[in-house]
Image (cartoon, rainbow, N blue to C red):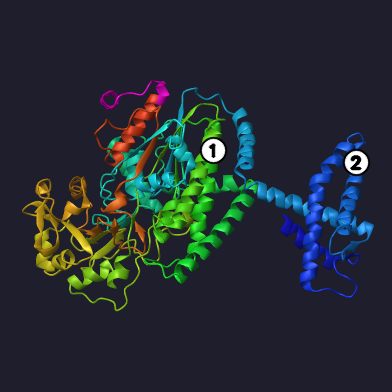
Amino acid sequence: MWAVSTVTMLVLAGILPDFQLQSPDGDSATTIAVTAALGAGVFGVLSAVVWPLLVRLLLLVPALVLGLLVFFLNGSLLLLALRVNPSGQAEAAPETAVIVAAVMSAVASATGAALAVRDDDAYRRRLYRLADRRRRRLPPCSSTPGTVVVQLDGVGHDVLRDAVDKGLMPTVARWLGAGPGQPPTHRLTPWRTDWSSQTGASQLGILHGSNHDVPAFRWYEKDTGEVMVSNRPSSALELQRRAAERTGGAGLLAVDGASRGNLFSGGAGELALVLSVAVRRRRGNRSRDGYFAYFSDPANAVRTFLSFVAEAAREIGQSTRARLRKEHPRVSRGGLYPLIRAFATVVQRDVVVAAVMGDLLAGRTAVYADLVAYDEVAHHSGPRSRDAAKVLRRLDRSLALIENVAEHAPRPYRIVVLSDHGQSPGETFRSRYGLTLGDLVRAGCGLPVPRRAEQTHSGAEARATVRAALRRPVEESGEDHRPSRRPEPVVLASGNLGLVSFPDVPHRMSHEEIDARHPALLPTLANHPGIGFLLVRSEEHGGLVLGARGARTPLDELDTDPGPLAVFGPGAADAVRRTHSFPNTADIMVNSCYDPDGGEVLAFEEQIGSHGGLGGAQGLPFLLSPLACSPPVEDGEELVGAEHVHRVLRRWLREASEAKAPLTVEAAEAAEAGERAA
């Protein structure tokens, strides 16, 4: 406010002839600027200290007279500020002082309002007032506990634990009882993703109870000839339809639910920023409605705009510093990326959090919201970078804001926080070997390889959010929605998971068919140092895992002889076998190599923090749940797969709706089985 007042005073001195900030002989620009800064500072102090006293003294003055006196008193304060200015150069005629003081007060008021809306307390109080007006028009809500689930996209279990230990997330630390004398209110449980460790598969399983036949973030379907992409609205809608058809259910949020910022609706009636409805044009049911509702309040627009500009500038500074320090690994962060990052970390966050707060104050039964900020930054800066750590700190503030609002909600709320996957660090396949996975596949097929390797565009969820908000095509221009059915292979990347399909063959090719057609392809891939293992169909064994130096392990022997999967840890064999059973699994599934010492993988996309396949922290997200809920699993058991997480959340919703004490896992599963039978 001081800086803005100084600039205002300089502008007025240039406009008004009777307002001077310099001596008759003239002064340097520096002297004039210092004079303006001192004058603005003294005026601000006098306004803050003297003005409240004057108002108290004038309370008995009639309102009309007080309204006229305000201008003269304000002008008098400005004249006093100019007289006590140490520079001694400023002066103004009394009538001009009244004008200058009025303009400076108006500008200071506007600046103060703009800064106030960035304050969480002021922001929360304003939302309380708006929600109270809405709530008066709604029928009373239930007194049973509601449930709000916040997804911190891409935050792995170990990353969350480290952030708590380092003091980056004090709200989560308090919930876990990490501070002295603080009893825990929540429990932290790790869970393992499926082979496809990405938002499309995880969130579909969590919200709709099934992620069957989702082998990756993007894949080619031979029956339709289309490339399915999890963050394309048409694909998301189709995946949601398939999941509902397979489970026969309406989704996790079907009963008085709200879905905010997600890829899928979860069956909710209240939707905002949901990608699967972005293709619909019906009034009141579009993905961008959340933006219109949020920015209809000018205070929200000011708050978010200021933070947006600051975040874009922060990204430019951080990327410049990384480039000057020659940090490695590093990916390009130029072009529009600063704006995309600012959108994900500011606009999407503010809109989603505001929508969740409105849901809480409206008393909705179940709310599920996705915050994509960390995932976007970690892709380009690294999952454990300073940039990502700062995002975690701000996400913790969002959780605190939601918690504070829940205390004023018309019903009690249980706050669950989870992640859909983690991220594994490592340089890109292209930067290490100078070629992409597509180049390697073409070389193995004996096809010409471009001299210069082309980048594989990142498939981060935030980019889809931006493009959906702007009504732009979701896929990058370089990706083909309907590849031609030529003999050339279609090669797609999902983090460190690659998929190779031959569109001219209508069925999933077997190991024997691929060898007969391209004898060098499978050995070229399996023996490359950047490849961890391959999965192919076999006419003799059903399915084979291939590795370097001729390693061949049938799927039914993986438990006794994990072969190339040994380095990927427990659960890898089950995850691979499950994906092998999908109808749309690619002809060749390629997982990059994994270094267990550093926890690093090689991404087939332009990301130094990646997820999508097996290897490292990407497959170990977390579930943070209130102690009022039953334990997710019994002691000694593991929480495996997004579908399992869906069953746990559904159990907690049932407990809350019936206002029961936490059930045992066995009792909950028995009740759920009875409901399915009924």
Work out whether 79 lies above or below 188. Answer: below
**What segment is highlighted magenta in the picture?**
656-678
User: Mark 1 and mark 2: span between their CA atoms?
Assistant: 41 Å
Where does label 2 land, which residue?
66
Q: Is residue 334 magenta?
A: no
Quarter of the image with the C terminus in it: top left
Residue 670 in percent (x, y) is at 26, 24
Label 1 belongs to which residue?
A: 357
How crowded pointer 1 is (Cα within 10 Å; few <14, some 14-19, many 20+) is rated as many
Find residue 243 and report its image quarter. top left
Residue 65 left/right relative to 356: right
The residue carrying pointer 2 sits among few (fewer than 14), some (14 to 19) or many (20 or more) residues within 10 Å by Cα, namely some
Q: Residue at x 25, y 47 (%)?
A: 213
Residue 563 seen in the figure: yes
- Look at discs 1 and 2 and give the one toward the viewer: 2
Please, what secondary structure does the residue beneath circle 1 have?
helix
**Viewport quadrant of the N terminus:** bottom right
The structure residue drawn at horizontal position 85% and vertical position 55%, both measured from the top left corner, is: 81
Amino acid of disc 1? Met
Taking depth in this image into account, of 515 and 399 the one nearest to the observer is: 399
Q: Is residue 227 left or right of residue 515?
A: right
Q: Nearer the viewer, residue 130 or 505?
A: 130
- Give the vertical position of 183 relative to 99 (above or below): above
| Image spot of residue 150 (x, y percent) | 44, 40
Residue 464 shows in this picture = no
